Amino acid sequence: MKTILLVLIAYLLGSIPTGLWIGKFCYGINLREHGSGNMGTTNTFRILGPKAGTATLTIDLLKGTLAVLLAVWLNSALSPLIVGFFAILGHTYPVFAQLKGGKAVATSAGILLGFAPVFLLYLLLIFLVTLILSSMISFTSITVAIIAVISALIFPAFDFILKDYDILFTLVIMAITWVIILRHQDNIKRIKAKKENLVPFGFNITKQKPK
């Protein structure tokens, strides 16, 4: 019963449509009708500004972290990683937003913050470098997700950051990466067409030319 409750709580936490609610209740703006139409951090920054974007990023991150920590604090029979993954499912398919959610990046980072913070710090450094080179949040997110899988497979062999092989951890990282790639299909098409949206800094090494 406790396991079912934890899974439900994690899913409901993930289902909180942060950017959508901030836009509607604080700015009178429906994010689905502006920019990319997504309710995640990137579109919130673009449409509502840095305060709303930062709030969305923070809350979406903490949704994953809290789901993991609840499982730890309550001595869940189910791995905190699995419980946390249900927060990702909630974020991606939120019951509070017609099952049309975000792209899982921030909430996935929140799970790592609660379970493997040093690994998250490593990925954050990769994220920043890739973002500066590419000028694209989408490209950066996909790249870091793929690097996370490769790192989870390789690092334990060298006793670097990840000390031991953890099959469950690796499988969850693979599942997260699959979700992130799946949710970025439209972005991938735009990247291939050289039309992906850019952040206002960086080197744009792929020479995107958005409209």
Image (cartoon, helix red, strand yellow):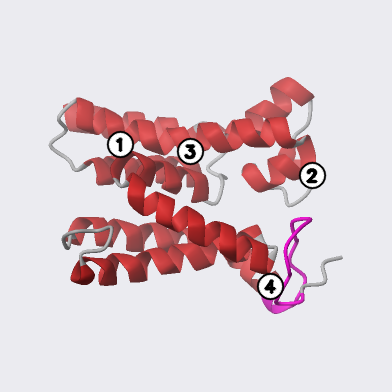
Which image quarter: residue 200? bottom right
At label 1, counting other C-alpha atoms closer than 10 Å, the crowd grade (few under 14, some 14-19, many 20 or more) is many
Query: Gap in Å between the C-alphas at discs 3 and 2?
Result: 23 Å
Farthest residue in the right direction?
Answer: 211
Give percent across and percent down for residue 156.
21, 66
Q: Which residue is mark 1?
A: 68
What is the three-letter code of the residue carrying label 1? Val
Camera-side residue of 184 and 65: 65
Split into 4 quadrants, where in the image is the C terminus?
A: bottom right
Camera-side residue of 157 and 207: 157
Give percent across and percent down for residue 196.
73, 66
The reply to whether residue 184 is visible in this rendering is no
- Point out the tag, 1 or 3, that comes first from the N-terminus: 3
Left or right of 66 in this view: 128: right
Residue 191: image tag: 4
**Magenta region:** 191-207
Q: Which residue is mark 2?
A: 34
Q: Nearer the viewer, mark 3 or mark 2?
A: 3
Q: Is residue 198 magenta?
A: yes
- Point out the tag, 3 or 4, that comes first from the N-terminus: 3
- Point out the tag, 1 or 2, that comes first from the N-terminus: 2
Give percent across and percent down for residue 7.
28, 35
Determine whether the residue tagged by mark 3 lies in a helix, strand or loop.
helix
